[in-house]
Image (cartoon, rainbow, N blue to C red):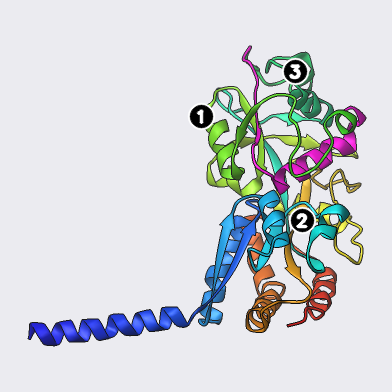
Amino acid sequence: MKKIILSIFGGCLFAGLTNANAQMLINGAGATFPYPIYSKWFDEYAKVDTSVRFNYQSIGSGGGQKQITERTVDFGASDGPMSNENLAKAPGKLLHIPTVAGADVITYNLPGNPKLKLDGDAIVNIFMGNITKWNDPKITALNPDVNLPDLPIVVVHRSDGSGTTYIFVDYLSNISSVWADSVGKGTSVKWPVGLGGKGNEGVAGQVKQVSGAIGYVELIYVKQNKMAYADVKNSTGNFITPSLDSIMAALATAKIPDDFRFSMVNPSGEKAYPIAGTTWLLVYEQQKNATKGKKLVEFLNWALTKGEGMATTLDYAPLPESVQQRVLERIKTIKY
C-alpha cells in the first residue's frame, strides 16, 4: 500500500513540476510606487493566462531603467520618464506605456499625529534643512490650531534610484527656483539633509520608527501602515488631501504628448493634489523573443482594459478612457 501511495504521490509531483516548467516566465524590475497594483495585476492575470508567470522585482525606478537598458529583464518600470540621454543608451527603441497615476504624500511621526497642512515653501525649507524644528513659525502659521512640539525634524528620503523621488523633486523644482538650481530633479539627487530608506517600504518604516521624522511615500503605503499625512496647498491656494479624487483631478489637467513622457505636478485644477504623477512600463518596440513578446503584448492589452478597473481599490487613478485608447494604439506598434 505504501508503495502505491508513494507512486501516486510521485506521479502527482512530477505532473505538477511538468506544468510549472511549462509556464513562461516574464521578468520585470523597477518602481516601488506601483508595486501594490502591479502585484494585483500579475496575480489576477495568472488566472487569465495560466501559461505565463510574471516575476517583478520592486527595486526602484532607477534600477528598472538600468535593467531594461541592459536588457537583463523583459520590461522595466519607472515613475520618472527616461531622459533623452538614457533612451539613447538603450540598444533599441524603448516605449513608455503609462499605466496608472498616484500621489506622493508627506508623512510624519509626531505625538498624537495631528492632521497638518503644509505649503510648498515649508516643504522645500524642511527638505533643504532650513526648518529644523516642528514648532518653526512657518509650520505653526499654517497650523494655528495645532500644538506643535519643540521637536527636531528628521528628514527621511529615498536612498535608491526612485520614481517616487522623481515626482517629489519634480514638484519641488517646479515651485522653487532655489531647489531647482541647487538640488534639481531626477530619480536620484544629492539630498541636503536626511536619512535614506530603500524603497517606499524603507521610508515608511524609518518614519514610523523615528519620532519627529518626515518623509514622502506613495499614498497606499501610508494607508496600509496607518500613518499620518499632510494636506498640501496647491497652485490655486487650496489645501488638498491626497486622495483618489484629487489625483484624478490632477491627471485631468495633464498635457500628454505622443511619447507619453509627461509631468503632472503642481497642476492648475482647484481640487487637484499638487504632488502626483503617473508610472510607466518600459518595453522595447522590437521584442527579441517572439513568444515572450506576444505574451507581453497580450498582458499589456489586458492591463490597459481590465486591469485599469482595479486601480481605484488601491487608491491609484486609472488613465482616462481617451488616454487608454491612445496607449492601446501605441501597444499595437510593438513588434515580435
Pick the residue in front: 23 or 98.
23
The region drawn magenta spans: 150-178
Three-letter residue code for mark 3: Ile
Determine which residue is flagged by label 3: 131
Kindly indicate the quadrant of the structure image that contains residue 333. bottom right
Where disc 3 sits, the SS reads loop
Three-letter residue code for mark 2: Thr
Residue at x 69%, y 29% (from the top left corner) = 116
Kindly indicate the quadrant of the structure image that contains residue 305. bottom right
Distance (Cα) linking label 2 and label 3:
30 Å
Residue 176 lies in the magenta stretch: yes
**120 sits left or right of 135 in the view:** right
The answer to whether residue 42 of the structure is visible from this angle is yes
Of callouts 2 and 1, the N-terminal one: 1
**316 sits left or right of 87 in the view:** left
Using the image, tell me which numbered label, if any, was put on residue 278: 2
